[in-house]
């Protein structure tokens, strides 16, 4: 018993009113003896090694009264927190967070950048790739889905916008939950929702159910972007953050390339599917939807083997779990570098004071759904409080400026991304219409048509005793013509109409020449038997190849911009990157006035996409760095949700001017980019600050 540890002695001795009180436990404590001199040492109670260091666990003398008071002072607030003002607690928490931010930066630097970060980079990259794929899926399947599900123009427009609507809601909701439930957990939820409903949407036949599935699928994938960037940034040091977050953005480009390549190789093969009777059809575009869910599923599986963000765990007071993960990061990187003997030297990490009031509901309280209802409403209230916090005086100006920059960027970028393919189709249609063949006053009798008629206009013709068997009409119009004693069997048609025609004693058997295709026609003694049921995919469009190629080149063109932004992000700063990229993109918009051919439009699209990608990357980086850890995903989710709202407006506005004028879309896009770029220059630079 000659040796006692320091903690025990601290508890045994109490310093009161200038005297030491000794415990009444029957042991002699030497309380009546005069105090030792400052420099005096005891050979019995203090051990020394050759370097004159105190052995760990040795008794080191009676603690000084000032040390005891300091410890009591530190312990006192923990007892009295419930009686303290919330403002005082928040002030103490902010002070703790500032200390943690600098300590955490040093810890991440000690852990190094290596195998662990690169593994997480590819896992999160797959999630970001799934987000990029989701943007392109509906656009690629619409031409086929509209025939498969008999979609009207309004239905097609709604299907094109519903994904953005789901992504807008998902970004705000799941981004907010990530600050309360954790990055990893919410990202798994987000990817699982997307994978499940994307898979389901490939099998459903009805338009309404398909629309619902794509909405929920978009909601799931909408949460990935804010969570992925918040998650990955918390494993990066200040010197690596800007560059490696920019490299991560490349996976969005890879997602676009993947979707374009898969659409190009799968959708035109209409035989890649099956049918069950006349009601259920699984065509090639549904195979494409299934294939597009693969990056999401791969990321979901790989994410199960990755840890939670230690920065998030420290924010909610889980010190030991955070320490273990940081040690795992350190050991993984050191082993990869060939230095397994390197020891993780951190023993204690500062954790901020916990201010939130969590309600723990006992299992005996109420019913199960009442307990879940309380938990859900409490969590949603905390998310809403985080949303409001982003608009407090400390962050209001930054949030509003970022909101304008995100919105103007999305309005112009997504608007033009839709406008480019629509303009190319319009130019193709103009060229196609210019090649139309016109036949006037032709007379055909006792002839069998068993081949395709395409891009023709027949005026004032007479057709008697003719047969139309196993053939296709494509873009064919019959005007003021006579059909008498004719027979139509197994006929398929696309954009084919009969106007002001007289049809006498004619039989239509197993055709898709429905009533709406006969405009102001007189049908006398004519019979329609066994009309084709359901919707049928149109025969292959010649411009499918070009549309996929345009999307492929547009995605590939951002590669140089991605590389440049990654290499220069930490050198010239985020603000100059955003402002410069948006202003250069605005200049590119003006050259669109000279885009009067398909090749010119493709070229200007590639230039615009390549110039604007640097602004997107810098926006992602600065949004992560401007907000503290417990608000980071929430703020990113709000701004990304606003971005998707800008995408919805851009798609609606720009597409409405196709074939009417190019002036409005070009001026709107360029002015939005100039305004957003100039405003971005007023944002604070963040490349030198630690992650709060």
Image (spheres, rainbow, N blue to C red):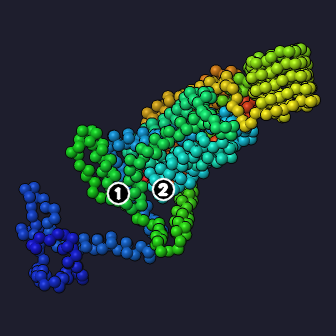
- Residue 516: tell me if it is visible: yes
The one of 304 and 639 positioned closer to us in this rendering? 304
Around disc 1, counting alpha carbons within 10 Å, would you say few (fewer than 14), some (14 to 19), or many (20 or more)? some
Q: Which residue position is annotated with label 2?
A: 179
x and y percentages locating residue 395 in the rendered image? 53, 55
User: In the rendered structure, are the residues bearing label 1 and label 2 in contact, judged by CB atoms less than 8 Å apart?
Assistant: no
Q: Which residue is mark 1?
A: 321
Residue drawn where x is 48% and y is 42% of the image: 297
Image quadrant assignment for residue 5: bottom left
Residue at left offset 27%, top offset 57%: 347
Left-right relation of 631 to 447: left
Q: Position of residue 538 (x, y in %)?
A: 70, 29
Identify which residue, 460 or 398, lies in the foreground.
460
Mark 2 Cα shell of 10 Å, populated few (<14), some (14-19), many (≥20): many
Instruction: Say above or below: 42 vs 109.
Output: below
Above or below, 17 against 315 in this view is: below
Q: Is residue 91 above or below residue 263?
A: below
Residue 345 left/right relative to 414: left
Q: Give me the C-alpha separation between circle 1 and circle 2.
A: 17 Å
SS under mark 2? helix
Residue at 24%, 71% (x, y): give it.
Answer: 67
Name the foreground residue: 269 vs 216.
269
Task: Judge from the rendering whether residue 473 lies leftward or rightward of residue 189; answer left or right.
Answer: right
Q: Nearer the viewer, residue 625 or 277?
A: 277
């Amino acid at each position: 018993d000659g040796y006692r540890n320091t903690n025990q002695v601290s508890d045994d001795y109490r310093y009161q009113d200038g005297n030491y009180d000794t415990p009444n436990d029957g042991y002699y404590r030497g309380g009546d003896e005069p105090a030792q001199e400052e420099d005096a040492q005891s050979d019995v109670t203090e051990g020394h090694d050759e370097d004159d260091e105190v052995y760990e666990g040795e008794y080191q003398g009676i603690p000084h009264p000032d040390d005891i008071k300091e410890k009591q002072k530190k312990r006192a607030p923990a007892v009295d927190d419930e009686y303290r003002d919330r403002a005082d607690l928040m002030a103490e928490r902010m002070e703790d967070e500032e200390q943690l931010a600098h300590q955490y930066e040093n810890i991440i630097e000690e852990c190094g950048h290596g195998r662990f970060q690169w593994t997480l980079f590819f896992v999160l990259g797959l999630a970001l790739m799934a987000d990029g794929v989701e943007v392109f899926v509906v656009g690629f399947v619409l031409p086929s889905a509209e025939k498969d599900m008999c979609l009207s123009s309004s239905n097609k427009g709604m299907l094109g916008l519903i994904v953005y609507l789901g992504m807008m809601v998902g970004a705000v909701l799941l981004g907010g939950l990530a600050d309360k439930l954790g990055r990893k957990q919410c990202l798994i939820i987000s990817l699982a929702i997307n994978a499940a409903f994307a898979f389901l949407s490939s099998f459903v036949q009805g338009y309404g159910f398909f629309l619902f599935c794509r909405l929920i699928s978009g909601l799931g994938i909408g949460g990935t972007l804010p969570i992925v960037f918040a998650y990955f940034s918390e494993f990066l040091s200040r010197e690596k953050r800007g560059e490696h977050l920019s490299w991560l953005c490349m996976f969005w480009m890879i997602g676009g390339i993947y979707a374009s390549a898969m659409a190009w190789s799968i959708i035109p093969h209409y035989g890649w599917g099956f049918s069950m009777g006349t009601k259920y059809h699984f065509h090639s575009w549904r195979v494409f939807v299934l294939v597009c869910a693969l990056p999401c599923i791969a990321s979901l599986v790989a994410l199960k083997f990755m840890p939670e963000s230690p920065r998030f765990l420290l924010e909610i007071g889980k010190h030991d779990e955070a320490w273990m993960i940081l040690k795992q990061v350190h050991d993984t990187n050191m082993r990869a570098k060939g230095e397994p003997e390197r020891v993780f030297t951190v023993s204690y990490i500062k954790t901020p004071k916990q201010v939130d009031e969590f309600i723990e509901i006992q299992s005996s309280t109420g019913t199960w759904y009442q307990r879940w209802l309380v938990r859900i409403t409490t969590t949603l209230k905390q998310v809403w409080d985080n949303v409001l916090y982003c608009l407090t005086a400390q962050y209001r100006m930054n949030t509003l400026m970022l909101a304008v920059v995100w919105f103007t960027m999305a309005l112009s970028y997504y608007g033009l991304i839709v406008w480019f393919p629509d303009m190319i189709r319009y130019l193709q249609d103009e060229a196609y219409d210019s090649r139309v063949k016109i036949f006037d006053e032709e007379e055909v009798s006792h002839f069998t048509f068993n081949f395709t008629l395409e891009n023709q206009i027949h005026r004032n013709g007479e057709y008697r005793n003719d047969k139309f068997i196993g053939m296709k009409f494509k873009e064919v119009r019959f005007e003021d013509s006579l059909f008498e004693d004719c027979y139509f069997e197994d006929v398929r048609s696309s954009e084919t109409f009969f106007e002001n025609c007289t049809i006498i004693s004619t039989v239509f058997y197993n055709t898709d020449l429905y009533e709406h295709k006969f405009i102001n026609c007189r049908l006398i003694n004519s019979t329609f038997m066994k009309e084709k049921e359901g919707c049928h995919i149109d025969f292959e469009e010649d411009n499918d190849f070009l549309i996929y190629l345009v999307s492929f080149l547009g995605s590939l063109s951002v590669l140089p911009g991605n590389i440049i932004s990654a290499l220069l992000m930490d050198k010239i700063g985020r603000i100059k990157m955003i402002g410069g990229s948006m202003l250069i993109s605005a200049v590119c918009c003006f050259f669109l006035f000279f885009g009067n051919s398909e090749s010119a439009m493709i070229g200007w699209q590639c230039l615009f996409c390549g110039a604007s990608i640097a602004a997107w990357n810098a926006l992602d980086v600065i949004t992560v760095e401007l907000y503290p850890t417990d608000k980071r995903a929430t703020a990113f989710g709000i701004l990304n949700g606003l971005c998707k709202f800008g995408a919805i407006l851009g798609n609606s506005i720009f597409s409405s001017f196709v074939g009417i004028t190019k002036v409005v879309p070009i001026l709107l896009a360029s002015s939005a980019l100039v305004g957003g770029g100039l405003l971005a220059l007023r944002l604070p630079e963040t490349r030198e600050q630690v992650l709060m």
